[in-house]
């Protein structure tokens, strides 16, 4: 899906912003000023009468929220999309849950070797629903690992990492690594025996790595042995750096998902209409070299060239030439945010 | 994939997308149901298993057997599978790093146009083998049992001694019944009481013969309880 936001923005925003123009046009001999005013109110153009719509229009003209709505929600998912495709959003959702429960845990947690354990004891035993929230965070981390692996498994076995989604696979693998780093750094924070000694081992393992290993281990430990400095360092990594990176990369991941679209299950094939050319005889347009890069938007746009029209028969909507989302916009009911603009035109 | 295959894929994908349904509300409905399930599982796990606290961290105990979170078990078990000391860095860093790089670069060396799992047997079989290996190593790690737990039944008067043995980390080198390091550095203690007299057991724990560390720090009272417990194993 193409995120052609600026273009859409100009189309929809114009009439809404051109409030003054509409008034100027109507300032010809005809209805009196009060009549015009009444008509405007009826048409939903007046601030006090239809504030909601106006605010929507105001926001839309500045943010292009309807364009974003079309790009994000009205986009089509391919035929055959099934339950396997919910694993990614479930992983993202559990990340959000971890963030929320984590915020509440942070309200009671003290990242110091002398107080960390006691603050967890207090949280678990005294704070209202404290153990429940901590349990959700603790088991949520396991679930997140499970879900991210399942999501990766789906992507792998469906071949969804192939052209044109290679980059999204790379981002996903980085997200997997960051998620396990979250597990590792979070494990130390309760500061019980398991936490401490697992971290000591993890640090020793890091130190055994070639070249950067010892330096990285020194940086993480931040002292001669795992202790107070390590705890505050892991706390900062677990609370700020890594979640920030994960959130940013999820954003990039989603951007590419929306831009490129989700894959169909590989065994689902587009059925060709009667009389269409077989797969082998599909003319490929201009013969391109074997390793040629095909830009994602361009291939779809160049579709209805005279020689190859039969293939795209089901998509023979003239609006399609402009790219996938042009077609969608035509099929979907008019965007709610665009309505005031239409009314304005009618009254003008 | 060459240029022609890429174009063909995009064209086919456009058709599939045209035939598909809008993300809202169809796909989002499935996603929402999945999210509800995820939250329900989270809540159920939290309510049923809670969030218990282990004993407080104590950097002076050098005998605590560390155990990672379960999703690192496969890495941890890799360490046990690869025994020779010279190869340990290979297990700790080498294999995981190579696996990670291979995973990261997957789309750049697997460039074939085929996506159906059973028509690309190499990728599919490799994937399944990796999953089986990880599952097996995780299973091994999970069944290693808690290093601070001894399942062998004990008469009530020796419970305290058993607890100290478990918490002090004896099982890092020794084994008692099903638990502990089978084939580890130290001998099996399951029948130690019938082999060595109680006084000798106590002296061993106190002094630490050979490579075994001394446990004199436990104090006289705990030492006696440990010796009594171990002597009861016959």
Image: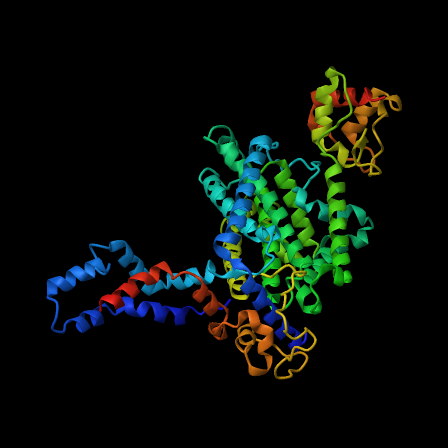
A235 relative to B164, above or below: below
> Horizontal placement of A231 versus B117: left or right?
left
Whether residue A138 is visible: yes
Q: Nearer the viewer, residue A286 or B71?
A: A286
Q: Position of residue B32 (x, y in %)?
A: 51, 47
Quarter the C terminus of chain B occupies: top right
Position of the N terminus of chain B, as image quadrant, is bottom right
Please say if B234 is above or below A66.
Answer: above
Quarter of image, res B187 = top right
Residue lying at the far front in this picture: please name it: A274
- Tell me: A316 left or right of A215: left
Residue drawn at (24%, 55%) of the image:
A50
Visible in this render: residue B53?
A: no
Decide: is B28 above or below A10.
Answer: above
Q: Give the colouring mode of the picture.
A: rainbow
Image coordinates for residue B193, horizontal then vertical, percent = 85, 22
**Which picture quadrant has residue B186?**
top right
Q: Position of residue A194 (x, y in %)?
A: 64, 38
Extreme residue in the right direction: B195
Could you say which is closer to the camera, residue A217 or residue A12? Answer: A12
Residue A37, image x, y percentages: 15, 62
How many marks do you count on the picture?
A: 0
């Amino acid at each position: 899906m193409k995120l052609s936001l600026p273009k859409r923005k100009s189309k929809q925003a114009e009439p809404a912003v051109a409030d003054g123009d509409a008034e100027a046009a109507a300032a010809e001999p005809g209805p009196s000023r009060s009549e015009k005013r009444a008509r405007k109110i009826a048409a939903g153009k007046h601030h006090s009468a239809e504030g909601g719509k106006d605010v929507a229009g105001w926001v839309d003209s500045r943010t292009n929220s309807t364009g974003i709505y079309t790009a994000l929600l009205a986009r089509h998912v391919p035929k055959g999309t099934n339950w396997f495709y919910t694993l990614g959003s479930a992983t993202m959702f559990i990340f959000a849950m971890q963030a929320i429960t984590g915020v509440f845990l942070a309200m009671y947690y003290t990242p110091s070797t002398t107080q960390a354990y006691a603050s967890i004891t207090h949280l678990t035993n005294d704070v209202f629903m404290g153990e429940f929230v901590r349990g959700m965070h603790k088991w949520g981390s396991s679930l997140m690992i499970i879900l991210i692996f399942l999501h990766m498994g789906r992507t792998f076995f469906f071949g969804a990492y192939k052209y044109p989604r290679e980059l999204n696979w790379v981002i996903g693998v980085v997200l997997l690594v960051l998620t396990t780093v979250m597990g590792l750094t979070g494990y130390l924070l309760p500061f019980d025996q398991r936490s401490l000694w697992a971290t000591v081992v993890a640090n020793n393992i890091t130190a055994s790595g070639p070249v950067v290993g010892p330096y990285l281990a020194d940086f993480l430990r931040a002292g001669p042995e795992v202790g107070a400095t390590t705890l505050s360092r892991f706390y900062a990594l677990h609370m700020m750096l890594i979640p920030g990176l994960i959130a940013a990369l999820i954003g990039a991941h989603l951007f590419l998902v929306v831009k490129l679209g989700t894959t169909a299950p590989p065994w689902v094939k587009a059925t060709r209409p009667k009389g269409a050319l077989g797969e082998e005889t599909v003319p490929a347009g201009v013969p391109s070299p074997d390793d040629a890069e095909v830009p994602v938007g361009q291939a779809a746009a160049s579709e209805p060239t005279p020689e190859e029209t039969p293939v795209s028969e089901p998509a023979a909507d003239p609006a399609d030439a402009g790219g996938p989302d042009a077609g969608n916009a035509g099929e979907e009911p008019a965007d709610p945010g665009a309505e005031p603009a239409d009314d304005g035109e009618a009254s003008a | 994939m060459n240029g022609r295959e890429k174009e063909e894929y995009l064209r086919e994908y456009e058709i599939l997308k045209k035939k598909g349904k809008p993300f809202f509300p169809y796909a989002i409905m499935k996603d929402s149901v999945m999210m509800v399930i995820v939250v329900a599982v989270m809540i159920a796990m939290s309510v049923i298993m809670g969030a218990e606290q282990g004993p407080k961290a104590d950097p002076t105990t050098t005998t605590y057997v560390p155990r990672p979170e379960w999703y690192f078990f496969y890495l941890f078990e890799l360490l046990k599978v690869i025994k020779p000391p010279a190869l340990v860095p290979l297990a700790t860093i080498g294999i995981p790093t190579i696996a990670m790089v291979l995973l990261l670069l997957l789309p750049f060396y697997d460039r074939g146009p085929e996506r159906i799992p059973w028509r690309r047997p190499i990728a599919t079989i490799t994937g399944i083998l990796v999953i089986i290996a990880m599952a097996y190593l995780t299973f091994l790690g999970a069944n290693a049992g808690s290093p601070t737990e001894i399942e062998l039944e004990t008469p009530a008067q020796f419970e305290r001694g058993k607890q100290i043995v478990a918490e002090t980390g004896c099982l890092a080198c020794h084994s008692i019944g099903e638990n502990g390091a089978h084939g580890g550095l130290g001998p099996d203690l399951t029948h130690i009481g019938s082999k060595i007299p109680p006084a000798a057991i106590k002296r061993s724990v106190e002094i630490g013969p050979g490579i075994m560390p001394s446990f004199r720090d436990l104090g006289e009272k705990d030492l006696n309880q440990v010796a009594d417990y171990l002597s009861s194993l016959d």
